[in-house]
Image (cartoon, rainbow, N blue to C red):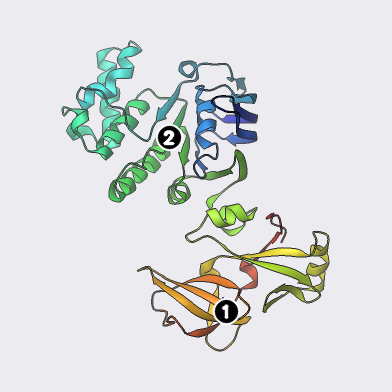
Amino acid sequence: MVTVVVDNVSHTYTKPVVTVALVDIDLEFKHGGLYALLGPSGCGKTTLMKIIAGLLKPTKGRVLFDDKDVTDWPPRKRNVAMVFQFPVVYEMNVYDNIAFPLRNYGYSESEIRKRVYEVAELMGLKDVLKLSASKLDPAGRQKVAVARALVREPSVFLFDEPLSNLDPLSRMELRVKIKELQRRVKTTMIYVTHDQAEALTLADYIAVMNEGRVMQFDTPQNLYEYPRNTFVGFFIGNPGMNFVNCELVEQGLKCSDILYPLSSREVEFLRKYGGEFVLGIRPEYIRVEVKQGLAKAKCSIREDLGTAVLLHLETAGGVVVKAKLPPVTAVKEGDEVFIDFPREKVRIFTKSGELVL
């Protein structure tokens, strides 16, 4: 097992045009954990994965495996296994696909057989070992790719969006397999994805990235409940956090026709950050009442999601929020209700988007 440290890493591509891909990345992936790099396309997560694998040398900074500086080491010396979005399988049966790297390393056939059967059992491939790997469905081929990486007993696993090419049912099945795999083999795993559902359900810690920077590196729960900035608040969640522009007044935050009350101590604390703020609250935490609340709002759109109802609510002053409620909610389009923001669920950000309260 290996702890991977990314120490002040930056990277700039010079061709075809100068592009800054990573800026001052500091991360530690402790041995045996499952971590995710999460962010939109072009945020730098794949570049960071390539640097960890040794496929790319950073413009600045170091990569350490435990206490060893491996920045200049080639991938083979790092003993890193990679699984990609589109699985690579060879024109041979499943057994030979899994055995391929062991034969390249010169293992005896008896040792190969032992390890192939162990991995095939773990990945649910024991019944298809004699079948042609290329004839399997996409989920089956991806299992073969994972098994072929696992059989080498790598120090670090790197997954580059391995489920994005699969149908929803196969994606769910393989997600469970990867989680089970991590629990059993206890190898450090770093999982690259743009899908927050995958990251939140799989990872112990998630690095949320945007424009080459790590916006927050934290547990799924903390990312959800205490986003460090408005980007994380909006990117995590389905839908993301509601944001309302506010002005600081003596009584609290004035958001158009909504006055969110604050204590005098809280007002004094916020004054040092200026006079304009952003109030954030997740849709499922908004209370929708018929008779009382912070402000009256009209339902403009009702979305029935099966397990929940999403109401688009607008106040007379133009404040628009989304409220996610149980499916039994009776509110219809055109109805007027009161909305309230539970104090313990409100997050206050600066105008530039940084969490302050």
Disc 1 versus disc 2: nearer the observer? 1
Q: Amino acid at mark 2?
A: Phe
Count of picture labels? 2
Q: Residue 12's x, y, as percent? A: 61, 28
| SS state under label 1 | strand
Instruction: From the image, tell me which residue sits under label 2.
Output: 159
Measure the C-alpha gap from mark 1 to mark 2.
Answer: 43 Å
Instruction: From the image, tell me which residue sits under label 1.
Output: 339
Report the disc number at residue 261.
none
Would you place residue 240 above or below residue 75 in this image?
Answer: below
Q: On the picture, is 339 further left or further right than 97? A: right
Comparing 78 with 121, the one in front is 78
- Callout 1: few (<14), some (14-19), or many (20+) C-alpha neighbours within 10 Å? many
Comparing 182 with 58, the one in front is 58
Marks 1 and 2 close (CB-CB < 8 Å): no
> Which residue appears at 33% of the width and 18% of the height?
101
Q: Residue 211's x, y, as percent? A: 59, 41
Q: Quadrant of residue 118?
A: top left
| SS state under label 2 | strand
Q: Quadrant of residue 129?
A: top left
- Callout 2: few (<14), some (14-19), or many (20+) C-alpha neighbours within 10 Å? many
- Of all residues, the one furthest to the left in this rendering is 130
Q: Residue 190's x, y, as percent? A: 48, 36
> Which residue appears at 31% of the width and 46% of the height?
173
> Which residue appears at 58% of the width and 16% of the height?
72
Q: Residue 307's x, y, as percent? A: 37, 68
